Amino acid sequence: MFESVLVANRGEIARRIIRTLNEMGIRSIAVHSEADADLPFVREASESVNIGPANPAHSYLDQAQVLAAARATGAEAIHPGYGFFSENAEFARAVVAAGLTWIGPSPEAIVQMGDKINARNLMEAAGVPVAAGTREPVTTIEEATKAAAKIGYPVMVKTAGGGGGIGMGVAHAEDGLAKAFDQATRAAARFGGTAAILLERYIERARHVEVQILGLNDGRVLALGERDCSVQRRHQKVVEESPSPGITPELRDRMLAAAARAGAAVNYRGAGTVECLVDADAQDFVFLEMNTRLQVEHPVTELVTGVDLVAAQLRIAAGEDVEIDAVPRGHAIEFRVYAEDPKRFLPGPGHITVWVEPSGEGVRVDSGYEAGNTVTPFYDPLMAKLCVYGATRAEAVERARAAVAGFAITGPKHNLPFCAELLDHPEFVSGDYDTGLVSRMRS
């Protein structure tokens, strides 16, 4: 096992990784920007290095600075968390070239799954269901029009690279295709590094369900249950739960088997997620994409399986044999606590004067802030993840109501009022909801 690991991230995920490193007796090294110097993850690490100004391009995304910090502190490995460098094959290769261990899948697997069109084609060849869609990049509106006519409306238009719902749009008929295509093209050029566009058949009443996989050193790929991520605003997740209340046991078995095949197809090692769209009415699914990293919502899987996914990542990266025989039990729900307006979901950074986290049986809070800190406008507005666990979904929902009510934040705007509203919404309470729920709540 490693003696020292540098965490190339910030906020709640850096703090969460550092917690496991400290528990395992591994020297934890934090890197931070000037704006983040007072955050808890910096204080809780064994050692920290200031790598530059608030602008992430000159700190967290400065490859030379991060590698220099690793060399200066004698780090043996780098854990990227999620976001930033986590799915950057170039950086992963640079880490290995520097004589360090990359805690994640191989750069080759990152490349294979990073392009959505290539990933679709790979998955189809591996026997994983995919939606009707384009097998080659679409670069002009003329190509998009022909492809959409062949696929059939409605179609989802999205970037072939990138993620997080950026640039996604739906065209319900040909007269809406140009707008969706233009939106995706501009987003692709800005965030994806390529102008390539992908079209897929759009599922009208869909659930977004993903499977947590773990690729072991002996070649096996384990599927550790699914997470339902259908509560979304602007195609971005807000609430996740496990198990999904919207799929049958038969569908679950098929999804888990397909996810394991997906990982095996790219010789996957470490923690990853196979994301799917489920037709809520037909009880069938198609592959959406694969995230070659630790997910924001990994705590719900940890709560129902008892597996520390960060510890598993470390052991796999260190070349150790990992034996996991986890059968999911009970029910877990995660609420992303954002510094944002709860009505319009626009960022609302600010100085935190009150921060009181809920506690009690079945409550877990992964937070990146505390009273006295400032949520700046330079980074993602995620402040914390409030997670609850219960023997049943009904018990988890009740614990969530109490936990949301008991979480006090003063200073920045926050979405806890939205979480409370959601917990009383009939569709969410029943479990019979889809990705359009938040839009209906705000219509």
Image: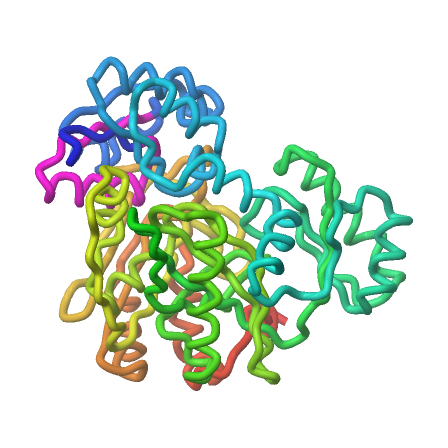
Q: Position of residue 435 (x, y in %)?
A: 56, 70
In the figure, residue 161 lies in which quadrant? top right
> The C terminus appears in which quarter of the rendering?
bottom right
Question: Does the image show residue 369?
Answer: no
When the figure is inspected, residue 39 is found, relative to residue 256, above or below; the finding is above
Q: Position of residue 297 (x, y in %)?
A: 37, 57
In the figure, residue 405 lies in which quadrant? bottom left
Residue positioned 28% across, 20% down in the render: 70
Left or right of 9 in this view: 235: right
Left or right of 313 in this view: 120: right
Residue positioned 57% across, 64% down in the render: 127
Q: Position of residue 346 (x, y in %)?
A: 53, 50
Q: Which residue is most to the front? A: 218
Q: Nearer the viewer, residue 232 or 90?
A: 90
Q: Nearer the viewer, residue 354 or 105?
A: 105
Q: Position of residue 168 (x, y in %)?
A: 67, 53
When the figure is inspected, residue 118 is found, relative to residue 206, above or below; the finding is above
Left or right of 132 in this view: 52: left
Task: State yes or no: residue 177 in magenta.
Answer: no
Task: State yes or no: residue 29 in magenta.
Answer: yes
In the figure, residue 67 lies in which quadrant? top left
The residues colored magenta run 8-32
Q: How is the image coloured?
A: rainbow
> The N terminus appears in which quarter of the rendering?
top left
Residue positioned 47% across, 75% down in the render: 254
Question: Does the image show residue 140?
Answer: yes
Residue positioned 68% across, 41% down in the render: 187
Q: Nearer the viewer, residue 265 or 2?
A: 265
When the figure is inspected, residue 356 is found, relative to residue 40, above or below; the finding is below
